[in-house]
């Protein structure tokens, strides 16, 4: 664990009135459809500062079995795509300690302060990876956003783990850097 995060967790009871485990218990009593809803709840209802609220919500999701269930449900009948999904997650989590992998009902959002990528099993044989790449023209396998609309600027269709290559990693790194 990063030193700053360790310090934040250690200071949490003094600064927020509850330990991380106590905050996790409080959050379990609610269902939030978005990360920001839980953060805003902690800020408004409990007076927690944004930094602590964001950390509490992020760390509460790390061991949340519902996140696993969301991903499992996305890949039912599409199990052959799981290695592609796992490879993308492995790549994005190496981009920085601030990367959050946030499963939703039909996709997985990859974000820092802002979403910069979106992983969606589009068919039984293809994952669509949405990217936010401002100022880059679609070319080759880097297509327009298509079904992602305004959530992303580009889309890459992936049918095999080998397509998570240096070019794709470069696009992910560019999207990550612009999300800060």
Image: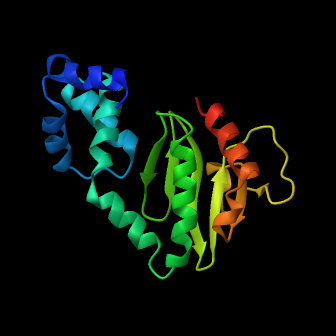
Point out the image quarter for the N terminus: top left
Q: How is the image coloured?
A: rainbow
Q: Position of residue 134 (x, y in %)?
A: 75, 38
- Name the outermost residue toward the bottom: 77
- Residue at 13% x, 28% y is 18
Q: Is residue 124 left or right of residue 4?
A: right
Q: Is residue 7 above or below residue 58?
A: above
Q: Is residue 43 left or right of residue 156?
A: left
Point out the image quarter for the C terminus: top right
Q: Position of residue 179 (x, y in %)?
A: 60, 34
Q: Is residue 15 above or below residue 82?
A: above
Q: Is residue 44 above or below residue 31?
A: above
Q: Is residue 44 left or right of residue 51?
A: left
Q: Is residue 137 left or right of residue 152?
A: right
- Residue at 72% x, 59% y is 156
- Residue at 43% x, 50% y is 102
Residue closest to the eye, 82 or 145: 82
- Residue at 25% x, 32% y is 42
Q: Position of residue 171 (x, y in %)?
A: 72, 45
Residue closest to the eye, 32 or 131: 131
Q: Is residue 72 above or below residue 173?
A: below
Residue closest to the eye, 100 or 134: 100
Q: How many marks?
A: 0
Q: Position of residue 168 (x, y in %)?
A: 71, 51
């Amino acid at each position: 664990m990063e030193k700053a995060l360790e310090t934040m967790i250690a200071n949490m009871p003094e600064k927020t009135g509850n330990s991380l485990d106590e905050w996790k218990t409080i959050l379990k009593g609610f269902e939030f459809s978005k990360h920001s809803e839980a953060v805003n709840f902690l800020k408004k209802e409990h007076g927690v500062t944004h930094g602590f609220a964001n950390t509490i919500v992020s760390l509460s999701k790390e061991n949340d079995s519902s996140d696993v269930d969301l991903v499992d449900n996305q890949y039912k009948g599409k199990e052959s795509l799981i290695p592609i999904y796992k490879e993308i997650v492995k790549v994005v989590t190496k981009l920085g300690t601030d990367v959050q992998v946030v499963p939703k009902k039909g996709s997985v959002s990859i974000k820092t302060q802002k979403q910069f990528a979106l992983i969606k099993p589009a068919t039984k044989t293809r994952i669509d990876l949405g990217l936010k790449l401002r100022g880059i023209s679609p070319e080759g396998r880097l297509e327009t956003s298509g079904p992602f609309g305004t959530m992303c600027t580009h889309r890459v269709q992936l049918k095999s783990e080998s397509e998570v290559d240096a070019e794709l990693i470069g696009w992910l790194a560019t999207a990550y850097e612009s999300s800060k």
